[in-house]
Image (tube, rainbow, N blue to C red):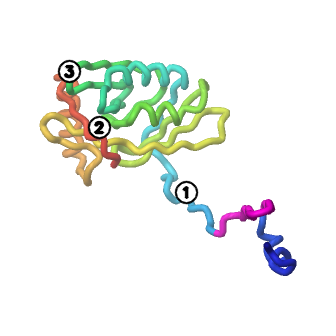
Amino acid sequence: QLTEKELADCKERIYLLWFTDNEILIIRPRDATFPDYKNVIPESFTHKYTIKGDELKQALKECLGITGKERVVIFNGNTITAVNSDTGSKIEIQLTGKGEFPKTGIGFNPIFLMDAISGDGETVIESNNHKELVKITTTGDNVVNIVMPMRITTGDGITTGDGETTGDEEKAIDNRIAQEIDENRVATNAEGV
């Protein structure tokens, strides 16, 4: 049992106080402060892609049927590609949105992306490259979703999303990834960057 003094001391900090014969339930506000998430999200992005949410969801669902255990889709230019390295199956879907994804290709878990699309309105996907977080918003919604890309490893062992690269190295990686996608030999590593 709480004494009158103890009850008076904590009254200002308690949201809910519930008594039963044998128990006391006290719910208090958190003492900690919420992390400053604005410092995590870049102020500007170099790539912006706008597409209808329902079109993107449908494309991701189609890709999900191919991906198998790897669960990764690759956004490259205006195309989503899903490859199943176990069966050799591949699907490429041309998107009708405005803008373009980085040519280096960005790998994502399609389920995480579908969760981030909060409606059928215009979905805006902003990114800088294949190694940094991606910001996803939907018009008419005040929610900002952040999705981290996945590391993509080609059959020749080239990995995107891992370490720093120069412009020439980026071009070489772009060409090798495009070649690997064309040859149905993309394997994925589901580790987040």
Q: Which residue type does callout 1 highlight?
A: Tyr
Q: Residue at (25%, 36%) from the top-left corner?
A: 188
Residue found at the far left of this picture: 156
The residue positioned 24% from the left and 19% from the top of the image is 89
x and y, in percent, of residue 121 in the image: 61, 26
**Residue receiving disc 3:** 88
- Distance from Cα at disc 3 to Cα at disc 2: 22 Å
Type of amino acid under label 3? Gly
Q: Is residue 13 left or right of residue 140?
A: right
Classify residue 53 as left or right of residue 18. Answer: left
Q: Earlier in the sequence, mark 1 or mark 3?
A: 1
Q: For mark 1, what is the residue?
A: 37
Q: Nearer the viewer, mark 1 or mark 3?
A: 3
- Label 2 amino acid? Thr
- Residue most extreme to the front: 21
**Residue that carries the numbered disc 2 in the rendered image:** 104
* Marked residue nearer the N-terminal end (3 or 2): 3
Q: Real-space Cα distance between discs 1 and 3?
A: 40 Å
**Residue 77, position in %: x, y?**
35, 29
On screen, residue 40 above or below 157: below
Mark 3 neighbour class, 10 Å CA radius: few under 14, some 14 to 19, many 20 or more:
few
Residue bounds of the magenta highlight: 15-31
**What residue is at 25 percent from the left and 53 percent from the top?**
163
Q: Give the image location of residue 61, x and y in percent.
A: 43, 22
> Alpha-carbon distance for marks 2 and 1?
27 Å
Task: Specify the quadrant of the image occupied by residue 8.
Answer: bottom right
Residue 27 shown in magenta? yes
Residue at 34 percent across and 32 percent down: it is 71
Question: Mark 2 packing: few (<14 Cα in 10 Å), some, or many (20+)?
Answer: many
